[in-house]
Image (cartoon, rainbow, N blue to C red):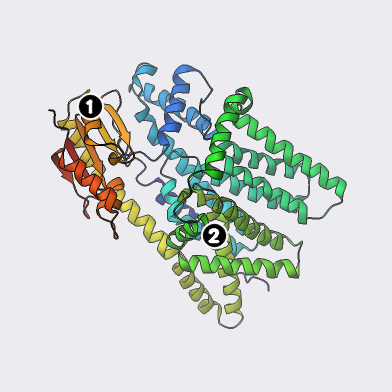
Amino acid sequence: MTSPALLSRRSHMILLSAVVVIGAALRFTGLGHGIPFALGVDEPEIIERSVRMMKSGDFHPHFFDYPGLYIYIQFLTACARFVVGSIGGAWANLNEAAPAEFYLWGRAVSATFGTVTILMVYHAGRRISPLTGLLSAAIFAVQSMHVRESHFVLTDVPTTFFVALTWVLALRAHERLTTRAFFWAGVAAGLAAATKYNGGAAVLLPLLVLLIGAGDWRWRLRALAAVVLGAAGAFLAGAPYTVLALPEFLNAFAYLSHMYAVGPAPPESGWVTYVKHLRINFSVPGLIAALTGVGLALRALWRAPRASASVAWLLTSAFALIYFWMIAGQRLTYGRYLLPLLPFLSVLAGGALAWLFEALHARLSRPRAAVLTAALLAGVCWVPATMAVTALRDAGKVSTSQQAYEWILANIPARTKVGMESRGVLLNPEQYQVEYFARFIRHDFAHYRDEGFDYLVASSQAFRTALYDVPPKPAAAIAYKDLFSQLEPITVFLPSPEHPGAEWRVYRVPRP
């Protein structure tokens, strides 16, 4: 079925521009929220290392939980921020520049990667049809998980960009059938792996194209060599200390892999956890549309297996299924691990809506078909868009974390020893003797007293499951109540519509 020319080229580009602007607005709004007291998990791991590189000239990250590329990108960003700040009189030497001054610029880089990924989704989707590209970009632009993570200096959003770039370049390689095109697809996959190890799965995209594309075996071997050479070279360029500090890297990588493979068992299987995340964030209508897209991919493959649109369908659905299978089998499960999957689900859902428009247009007038398709698009986008807007609205309010942070600065003297439950509020270690605990009940009252803690700041992020959840957890509830009864309550910050966040309780540790 031929897609009807629903829009003129000018109207098409205007709508695409509007989609990108909306996506950028969602990702750049509220970038400064939580700096420096409520940073994202692992943000300091990247920013503090990039600032340390700038101050020391030592380009060894001394950290292999991530390969290194995004730390280097943030290092360059930190250098630019320092130069601009110096010109503006913010500081006269490197020692005056605290890491907290670099988070906003670092987050802007993440938001930029997130915004450009919208264009990658569009270019991948338009290989199926121009309408698919436009609808797919619209669906991806409002994805709440991607919008939220684009506000933090973490590796997941740039990894998603490089995976999507590999996807587009692999489709381009199928169209051009040159070793150079496959080389650049391999480079993009290597950059994805150099940003985060799981990004290395992107190399499957050009390999799948080689598997199903045309050409004799000699040409396929040359193209395969180009992919491998490009991927390996880009990975080593982005993460050179994987070789320069090989034993250190291998030890760290082995430990990390061990945790993913045979670490503590999660409370439920990974596929159940990730399906729940997708049901809540991508939405049920979105998942139904994406699954319909998988069916359409099989249909296209059956009809014309080597056509450009069929290869785009196949590549999109195959990678989505493989990547989901890959992360669902791991012991460590985090919602943000789904981010590289979202562009592919968006194209599958966008392709299903475009196909539906074609089917409706065969039976109804074009305006009616367009209205019905737009209504279905709104249904697919409503939940993630609402969640994204709600999160940004809450980010503009004074959170309970900010209230607790400001109270601590105003009421607890410097150099005081403070225990913090969870890392929802971060204190400057140069100002306070601070120690963070996952849950205070891992120790009894005597431990905190004997270790010289003056204050304990408890968070419902930790004690909620023991005290508030139904059914309660009796042992944990008894332990918390026993601990809290021996502490002196000072103040509490409760969440409300005006002050979103966790409940925070400040206790003084009594002395004998």
Q: Which amino acid does the dot numbered 1 rest on?
A: Asp
Whether label 2 touches label 1, CB < 8 Å: no
**Residue 316 point in image, percent of width and height:** 63, 58
Q: Answer with left or right where residue 201 lies relative to residue 255.
A: right
Task: Specify the label residue 197 is tagged with.
Answer: none
Residue occupying the point 54% across, 37% down: 256
Which one is nearer the viewer's eye here, 348 or 493? 493
Q: Answer with left or right where residue 277 lies relative to residue 174.
A: left
Q: Secondary structure at mark 2?
A: helix
Image quarter where the C terminus lies is top left
Residue occupying the point 18% across, 39% down: 506
The residue labelled by disc 1 is 450
Q: Secondary structure at mark 1?
A: helix
Badge 2, how many Cα within 10 Å: few under 14, some, many 20+? many
**Residue 113 point in image, percent of width and height:** 51, 43
**Residue 289 point in image, percent of width and height:** 54, 68
Image quarter where the N terminus lies is bottom right
Residue 170 higher or lower than 194, as above or below: below
- Cα distance between the residues tagged 2 and 1: 55 Å
Q: Give the quadrant of residue 198.
A: top right
Which one is nearer the viewer's eye here, 163 or 465? 465
Q: Which amino acid does the dot numbered 2 rest on?
A: Ser
Which one is nearer the viewer's eye here, 40 or 334? 334
* Residue 198 in view (yes/no): yes
Residue occupying the point 26% across, 24% down: 431
**Residue 427 point in image, percent of width and height:** 28, 31
Residue 73 higher or lower than 302, as above or below: above
The residue labelled by disc 2 is 346
* Residue 396 in view (yes/no): no
